Image (tube, rainbow, N blue to C red):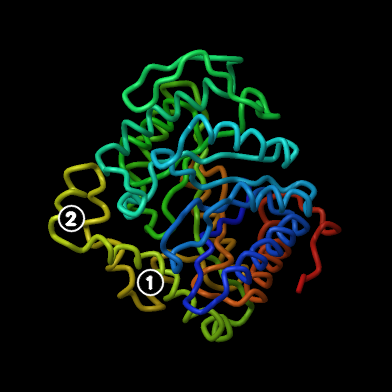
């Protein structure tokens, strides 16, 4: 099992955006030194409390100059809101600057992004499907033509080409069954949403695993969970309770832009019914104990979290546990604390770990 870190770059009101950006960069540096395999960052705009991660490729280009081995992954590029011909070259350049350590998630993105981006919601699926085909052709062919509904080009050459051949490893994620089916057919890795209990995910993950098996691919599930560690349960609660509640509140905050009944009807009709279901809002009403008991977050001693990961691994197909160490306005030192304890006390239980690579805490 790989061990990664996933960040949304949630930013509380009043926190300078530059401070958050530099904290994340220092946390990537620490993750590299501590032995994590990959650092994933969302691609997201417009809603500060949810995320200020507007240009993950730029962040990765900077991080690559400060790290040695950790892989860097976007989770996910919102393809319907991008020009795929331009994005193909930007990803290739980032792959070069990261010395081939780049990985790419490709998704339709959150429903609340379409209004501010001035793109009709009903175009999300067909734009997404066309963009995927264009990206693959751009990376693998010297020149190509494409005649689609949204993109029409003739004999175009996209440069530069990625360093990795034929292109960086691809992932997707979401809440619709068709996404899990497509990922399995193509042999992509898949992210599961960081907020949902495993029982809710069993059915779509079964679709993914079956599609992988039918098409000769190994399943590769990236399971995301907020994590906080200490040897003292009371100390843990004092240090993380407020941020853990904020994590859920911040994740649901953009839903406020989708509350009109006409908008909810549109979401249901156009394949984004999850955002009209009230599921995100309901999570904000959970108590601390409910969040911990339902394993929406892995919160506890290292020994407890090891047991939780062992149970998760027994379900099969989990390729990576991606911990969220920065969430809900958590202070930088607490994020570093979790990364350090996880690398020293949890990861060695699942793989051979060279303790000489474990980092001392970075300020």
Q: Quadrant of the N terminus?
A: top right
Residue 358 position within the rendered picture, expressed as x and y whole percent measured from the top left: 80, 61
* Quadrant hosting residue 73: top right
Mark 1 secondary-structure assignment: helix
Residue 122 is tagged as: none
How many residues crowd mark 2 within 10 Å: few (<14), some (14–19), many (20+)?
A: some
Residue, far right: 356
Residue 342 position within the rendered picture, expressed as x and y whole percent measured from the top left: 66, 64
Q: In which quarter of the image is the C terminus?
A: bottom right
Q: In this view, does 106 lie to the left or right of 196?
A: right
In the picture of the structure, the residue carrying the numbered disc 1 is 249
In the rendered view, tell whether residue 172 sits above or below residue 278: above
Q: Is residue 256 left or right of residue 343?
A: left
Q: Distance between the residues labelled 1 and 2?
A: 20 Å
How many residues crowd mark 1 within 10 Å: few (<14), some (14–19), many (20+)?
A: many
Residue 124 position within the rendered picture, expressed as x and y whole percent measured from the top left: 32, 39
Residue occupying the point 50% across, 60% down: 225
Residue occupying the point 42% across, 60% down: 46
In the picture of the structure, the residue carrying the numbered disc 2 is 264
Mark 2 secondary-structure assignment: helix
In the rendered view, tell whether residue 321 sits above or below residue 92: below
Residue occupying the point 55% across, 23% down: 138
Q: Which of 28 and 356 is in front in this view?
A: 28
Q: Nearer the viewer, residue 183 or 355?
A: 183
* Count of numbered labels shown in the rendering: 2
Q: Which of marks 1 and 2 is nearer the N terminus?
A: 1
Q: Is residue 171 left or right of residue 287?
A: right
The reply to whether dot 1 and dot 2 touch (C-beta < 8 Å) is: no
Residue 163 position within the rendered picture, expressed as x and y whole percent measured from the top left: 70, 29
């Amino acid at each position: 099992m790989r061990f990664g870190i996933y960040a949304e770059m949630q930013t509380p009101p009043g926190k300078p955006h530059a401070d958050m950006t530099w904290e994340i960069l220092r946390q990537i540096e620490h993750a590299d030194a501590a032995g994590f395999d990959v650092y994933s960052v969302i691609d997201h705009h417009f809603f500060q409390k949810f995320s200020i991660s507007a240009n993950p490729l730029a962040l990765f280009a900077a991080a690559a100059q400060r790290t040695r081995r950790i892989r860097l992954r976007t989770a996910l590029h919102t393809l319907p809101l991008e020009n795929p011909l331009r994005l193909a070259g930007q990803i290739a350049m980032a792959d070069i600057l990261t010395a081939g350590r780049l990985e790419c998630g490709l998704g339709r993105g959150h429903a609340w992004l379409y209004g501010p981006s001035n793109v009709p919601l009903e175009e999300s699926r067909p734009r997404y499907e066309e963009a995927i085909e264009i990206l693959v052709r751009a990376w693998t062919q010297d020149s190509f033509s494409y005649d689609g509904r949204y993109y029409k080009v003739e004999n175009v050459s996209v440069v530069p080409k990625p360093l990795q051949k034929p292109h960086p490893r691809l992932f997707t994620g979401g809440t619709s069954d068709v996404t899990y089916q497509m990922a399995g057919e193509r042999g992509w890795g898949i992210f599961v949403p960081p907020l949902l209990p495993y029982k809710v995910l069993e059915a779509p993950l079964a679709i993914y695993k079956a599609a992988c098996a039918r098409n000769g691919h190994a399943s590769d599930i990236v399971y995301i969970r907020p994590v906080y560690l200490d040897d003292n349960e009371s100390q843990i609660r004092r240090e993380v309770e407020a941020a853990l509640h904020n994590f859920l509140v911040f994740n649901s905050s953009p839903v406020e832009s989708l509350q009109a009944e006409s908008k909810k009807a549109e979401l249901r009709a156009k394949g984004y019914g999850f955002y009209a279901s009230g599921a995100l809002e309901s999570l904000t009403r959970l108590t601390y104990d409910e969040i911990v008991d339902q394993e929406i977050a892995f919160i506890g001693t290292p020994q407890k979290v090891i047991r939780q990961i062992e149970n998760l691994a027994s379900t099969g197909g989990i390729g990576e546990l991606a911990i969220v160490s920065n969430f809900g306005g958590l202070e930088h030192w607490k994020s570093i604390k979790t990364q350090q304890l996880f690398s020293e006390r949890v990861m060695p239980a699942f793989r051979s770990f060279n303790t000489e690579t474990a980092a001392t805490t970075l300020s």
